[in-house]
């Protein structure tokens, strides 16, 4: 199957959501909010994390199991298709000043040609979604066998086209400081185990607060993920207010989401202190759309 035919299976449904068909699979975009907080304790969505959901005849399939079935020669195109779904569905929400974090399988983009193709694909999706490139943060996961110079070149290409960069598993080690220099991210998600280790005493909390502040001085937003207990919200307050993501705050929802209703936009500037939020509802189940390839669903 050619890349062109893969993307021709992307369709917008009557409810406004974008989905795609790949072989027997229905691909849908799930979005999970990442929050900051207002002075009065009201949560504001600062960003979304894009998560792919695959299913066959309504039965969910783990994303890792889905990608194992994709032929090697089509994996880069399918990887890009998933990002396009996230971008289009985030744009459909019509929110102002909200970022989107999207995962990258960087091993697919090791050549200049592959990099150019992916950057062009991102630019096209961003244009169609009405999103500014800088609002799209490409999350680069670095593995031990990855070429650091190759990742730095890819990040530079993305930056040159106006896109942002995100990194995960930050633990303040030398390799993490090196990633900050090479990749120049705008978002950094802390390593959960490292975070909990430092949070056990006042000296560790003081250090975490310094780290959050130093990142902010470099225009980098720190993210604490995996917030499932109220104690984690209290920890974020003591850290100086990093962005927050977790099931306690909001579960991922398959597009179209209810987030515009649950968390309406506000112009009040957020503080740097997170707030407690109600428990979130369960993620919605995927529904197979009525569709016609390359056109709006009916």
Image (cartoon, rainbow, N blue to C red):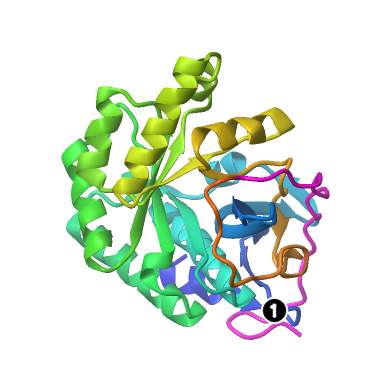
In the image, residue 104 lies at what x, y percent? 41, 50
In the image, residue 70 lies at what x, y percent? 51, 50
* Residue at image location 26% in from the left, 68% down from the top: 161
Residue 276 belongs to magenta span: yes
* Residue at image location 69% in from the left, 65% down from the top: 255
Residue found at the far front of this picture: 39
Residue 226, visible in the rendered structure: yes
Residue 157 or residue 6, whichever sits in front: 157
Count numbered badges in the picture. 1
Label 1: which residue? Answer: 16
| 37 relative to 178, above or below | below
Task: Find numbered disc 1 in the image and state the secondary structure of the residue it sits on.
Answer: loop
* Residue at image location 55% in from the left, 63% down from the top: 86
For the C terminus, give its image quadrant.
bottom right
Residue 44 or residue 48, whichever sits in front: 44
Say whether residue 162 is left or right of residue 19: left
* Residue at image location 60% in from the left, 77% down from the top: 94
In the image, residue 149 lies at what x, y percent? 16, 41
In the image, residue 99 lies at what x, y percent? 49, 62
Say whether residue 32 is left or right of residue 276: left
Give the residues drawn in magenta, as a range.
274-298
Which corner quadrant of the image does residue 30 belong to?
Answer: bottom right
Say whether residue 196 is left or right of residue 276: left
Residue 280 belongs to magenta span: yes
Majority secondary structure in the magenta region? loop
């Amino acid at each position: 199957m050619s890349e062109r035919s893969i993307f021709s299976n992307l369709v917008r449904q009557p409810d406004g959501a974008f989905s795609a068909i790949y072989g027997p699979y229905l691909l849908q975009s799930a979005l999970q909010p990442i929050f900051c907080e207002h002075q009065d304790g009201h949560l504001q969505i600062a960003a979304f994390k894009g998560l792919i959901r695959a299913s066959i005849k309504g039965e969910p399939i783990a994303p890792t199991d889905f990608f194992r079935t994709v032929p090697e020669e089509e994996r880069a195109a399918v990887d890009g298709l998933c990002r396009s779904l996230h971008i289009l569905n985030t744009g459909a929400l019509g929110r102002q000043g909200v970022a989107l974090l999207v995962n990258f399988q960087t091993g697919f983009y090791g050549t200049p040609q592959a990099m150019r193709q992916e950057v062009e694909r991102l630019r096209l999706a961003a244009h169609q979604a009405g999103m500014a490139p800088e609002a799209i943060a490409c999350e680069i996961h670095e593995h031990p066998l990855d070429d650091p110079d190759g990742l730095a070149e890819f990040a530079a290409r993305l930056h040159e086209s106006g896109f942002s960069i995100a990194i995960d598993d930050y633990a303040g080690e030398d390799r993490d400081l090196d990633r900050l220099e090479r990749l120049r991210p705008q978002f950094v998600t802390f390593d959960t185990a490292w975070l909990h280790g430092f949070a056990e005493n006042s000296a560790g909390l003081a250090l975490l607060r310094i780290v959050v502040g130093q990142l902010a001085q470099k225009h980098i937003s720190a993210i604490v993920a995996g917030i499932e207990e109220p104690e984690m919200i209290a920890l974020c307050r003591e850290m100086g207010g990093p962005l927050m993501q977790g099931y306690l705050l909001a579960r991922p929802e398959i597009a179209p989401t209810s987030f515009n209703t649950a968390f309406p936009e506000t112009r009040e500037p957020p503080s740097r202190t997170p707030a407690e939020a109600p428990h979130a509802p369960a993620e919605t189940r995927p529904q197979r759309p009525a569709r016609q390839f390359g056109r709006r669903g009916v």
